[in-house]
Image (cartoon, helix red, strand yellow):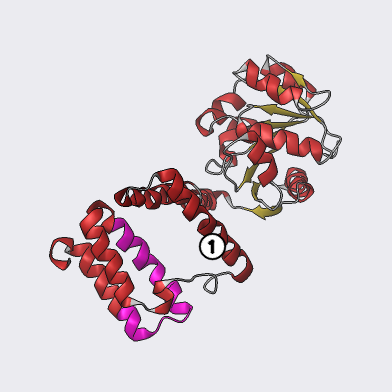
C-alpha cells in the first residue's frame, strides 16, 4: 500500500519535538491517530490536541493500528524503543534524531521493514513555539524509495525544505545545528553576562542583544555569506578590536581564549567581504598574541 496523507500515523514519544510535529502534520492534513509515551500525561496532551487521536498505553497496540510510526523519544532510547515490539509488514519506522542514523533500526532493516529519519533543523523551546517555527525549517532526511518520497512530501507540506543526508554525514550535519543553535544560545548568555560588569542585569542585556541576533539571522538569510557578515572585523578596525581584547583582560580574562578562537575562525569570511590584506594580518597577529600571552598584552 502506497504511503499518503491518509496513512495512519502514530507517535511514540510525546515531548516537545514529537508533539509539535504531530500537531503540525495534522494541520497539514496528515492522519495522526495515535500517541504513546512513558509519560501518560504527555501522550494525553498530544492526543487531546488532535481530533480522533487516541492514547495507546501499549506500543504493540499503536504499532498494529498505524502504518507510519514516528519514534520521537530521546536519542539514546530510539533503538531500544524500536526493538521493544515486533513491527508488522505494514509498519514504517521513522525517528527524528539529528545525530542518530537509520542504523539504529538495524533489527527492523534485517526484517525488510522500511525505515527513515526526519530531523527538523530547529530549536524546540516549547510545543507552542515549536509549531510556529516549523514553516521554513529544513528537514534532514534519510531513507530510500517510498519512505524517502513520503518524508520529502511531508517536509514540503509542512512548508519546510527537505534535504537528503547520507548516514556517514549525519554527525557533521547535527554538529552544524548544535553549533548554531545550542552554542549560539550559550554565546548569547555569555555575552549578556558581560553586562553584569556594568551593573546591568542579564534580562536587560538580553533585551538589548536579542534584536541584534534576529537582524544577523535576517542579514544571513537575505545576503548570505560573506555579505551578511558585518562589524569591526570586516571594516578592519584594529583599534576597536584591541579595545575589546583589553576589556576582556580586565573584566573577564577567562573568555579571552574563546573570543580569540571565534574571531580567528571568522577572519577568512571577513576577508572575503572586503577586509584588506594588511589589516587581516595585523588583526590575526593581535588575536594570536592575546590568545597565547594574555598576561603581557594588556
Q: Secondary structure at mark 1?
A: helix
Q: Residue at x 57, y 39 (%)?
A: 97
Q: Residue at x 69, y 23 (%)?
A: 45
Name the outermost residue toward the left: 296
Q: Is residue 208 magenta?
A: no
Left or right of 217: which side holds 293? left
The residue lying toward the viewer, choosing from 172 and 249, is 249
x and y percentages locating residue 18 in the rendered image: 65, 33
The C terminus lies in quadrant: bottom left
Q: Is residue 90 visible?
A: no
Relative height, residue 261 to residue 21 (above, below): below
The residue lying toward the viewer, choosing from 239 and 277, is 239
Q: Is residue 126 visible?
A: yes
Relative height, residue 245 to residue 131 (above, below): below
Q: Residue at x 28, y 79 (%)?
A: 282
x and y percentages locating residue 39 in the rendered image: 60, 18
x and y percentages locating residue 55 in the rendered image: 73, 18
Left or right of 131: which side holds 198? left
Q: Is residue 271 magenta?
A: yes
Provide the residue designation for mark 1.
216
- Picture mark count: 1
The residue lying toward the viewer, choosing from 90 and 270, is 270
Name the outermost residue toward the front: 199
**What residue span does the magenta drawing correspond to?**
257-281
Amino acid at each position: 500500500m502506497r504511503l499518503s496523507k491518509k496513512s495512519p500515523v502514530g507517535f511514540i514519544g510525546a515531548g516537545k519535538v514529537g508533539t509539535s510535529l504531530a500537531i503540525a502534520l495534522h494541520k497539514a492534513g496528515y492522519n495522526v491517530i495515535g500517541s504513546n509515551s512513558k509519560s501518560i500525561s504527555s501522550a494525553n496532551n498530544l492526543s487531546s490536541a488532535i481530533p480522533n487521536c487516541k492514547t495507546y498505553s501499549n506500543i504493540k497496540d499503536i504499532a498494529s493500528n498505524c502504518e507510519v510510526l514516528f519514534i520521537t523519544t530521546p536519542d539514546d532510547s530510539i533503538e531500544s524503543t524500536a526493538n521493544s515490539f515486533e513491527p508488522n509488514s505494514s509498519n514504517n519506522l521513522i525517528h527524528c534524531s539529528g545525530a542518530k542514523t537509520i542504523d539504529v533500526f538495524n533489527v527492523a532493516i534485517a526484517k525488510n521493514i522500511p525505515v527513515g529519519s526526519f530531523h527538523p533543523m530547529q530549536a524546540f523551546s516549547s510545543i507552542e513555539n515549536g509549531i510556529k517555527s516549523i514553516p521554513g525549517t529544513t528537514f534532514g532526511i534519510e531513507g530510500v524509495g517510498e519512505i524517502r518520497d513520503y518524508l520529502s512530501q511531508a517536509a514540503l507540506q509542512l512548508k519546510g525544505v527537505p534535504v537528503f543526508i547520507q548516514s556517514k554525514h549525519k554527525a557533521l550535519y547535527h554538529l552544524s545545528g548544535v553549533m548554531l543553535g545550542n552554542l549560539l544560545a550559550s554565546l548569547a548568555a555569555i555575552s549578556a553576562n558581560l553586562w553584569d560588569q556594568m551593573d546591568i542585569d542579564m534580562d536587560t542585556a538580553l533585551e538589548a542583544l536579542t534584536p541584534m541576533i534576529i537582524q544577523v539571522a535576517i542579514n544571513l538569510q537575505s545576503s548570505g555569506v560573506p555579505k551578511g557578515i558585518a562589524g569591526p572585523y570586516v571594516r578592519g578596525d584594529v583599534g576597536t578590536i584591541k579595545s575589546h581584547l583589553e576589556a576582556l583582560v580586565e573584566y573577564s580574562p577567562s573568555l579571552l581564549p574563546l573570543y580569540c578562537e571565534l574571531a580567528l575562525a571568522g577572519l577568512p569570511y571577513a576577508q572575503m567581504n572586503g577586509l584588506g590584506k594588511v589589516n587581516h594580518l595585523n588583526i590575526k597577529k593581535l588575536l594570536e598574541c592575546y590568545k597565547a600571552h594574555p598576561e603581557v598584552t594588556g
